[in-house]
Image (spheres, rainbow, N blue to C red):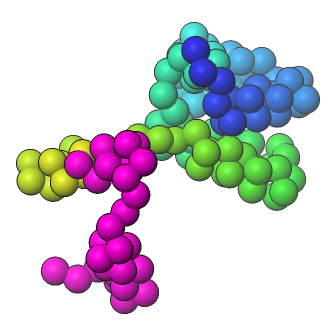
Amino acid sequence: MKLTPFGLYVRKLRLDLGLTLKTMADALAVSSAYLSSIELGDKQLTAKIAEDAVEFFQGRIGSNQIEELREAVARSVDIVPVSSLDSDEKVLVAAFARRLTEGAGVPNEVMNWLKREGKHGRSK
């Protein structure tokens, strides 16, 4: 079990607002057990649950807290969907992730390309 910033923050928000796990789970169309697993870090936070959670808290909390929730989401989501990529692209993503996790860093030419693409949009 690894508590995530999202799980900690959502649990605190719920308790501060006097909302039960079941109330939030019902609003997100998931089981209480599943939502609890996400809060506790036993299950991975998905983009859908994250979006639904932000929507759930809209109007219940202030804009600063919504921003903090979004930051907690960003720090908690560590899965990038690759299902729409072709096999060569998947291999490239895996190699890049492996290089980063091994501490090898990003080669300068790749970093320059990424910065250039960020400024000018995606090119083919």
As displayed, is residue 120 above or below residue 59?
below
Residue 52 can be seen in this image: no
Residue 16 image position (x, y, % from top left): 90, 29
Q: Is 72 left, or right, of 107 in this rendering?
A: right
Q: Residue at x 42, y 48 (%)?
A: 103
Whether residue 119 appears in magenta in the rendering, the answer is yes
Whether residue 53 appears in magenta in the rendering, the answer is no
Q: Which residue is drawn at 36% across and 80% down?
A: 112
Q: In which quarter of the image is residue 64?
A: bottom right
Dominant SS of magenta comes to: helix
Q: Is 50 left, or right, of 106 in this rendering?
A: right
**Which residue, as the protein is rendered here, is positioned at the far bottom?**
120
Given residues 34 and 56, the one toward you in this image is: 34
Q: Quadrant of residue 123?
A: bottom left
Residue 86 image position (x, y, % from top left): 10, 52
Q: Which residue is drawn at 58% across and 15% down?
A: 1
| Total tally of numbered discs in the picture | 0
Q: Residue at x 40, y 43 (%)?
A: 101
Given residues 122 and 19, the one toward you in this image is: 122
Magenta part of the chain? 95-124
Given residues 94 and 124, the one toward you in this image is: 94
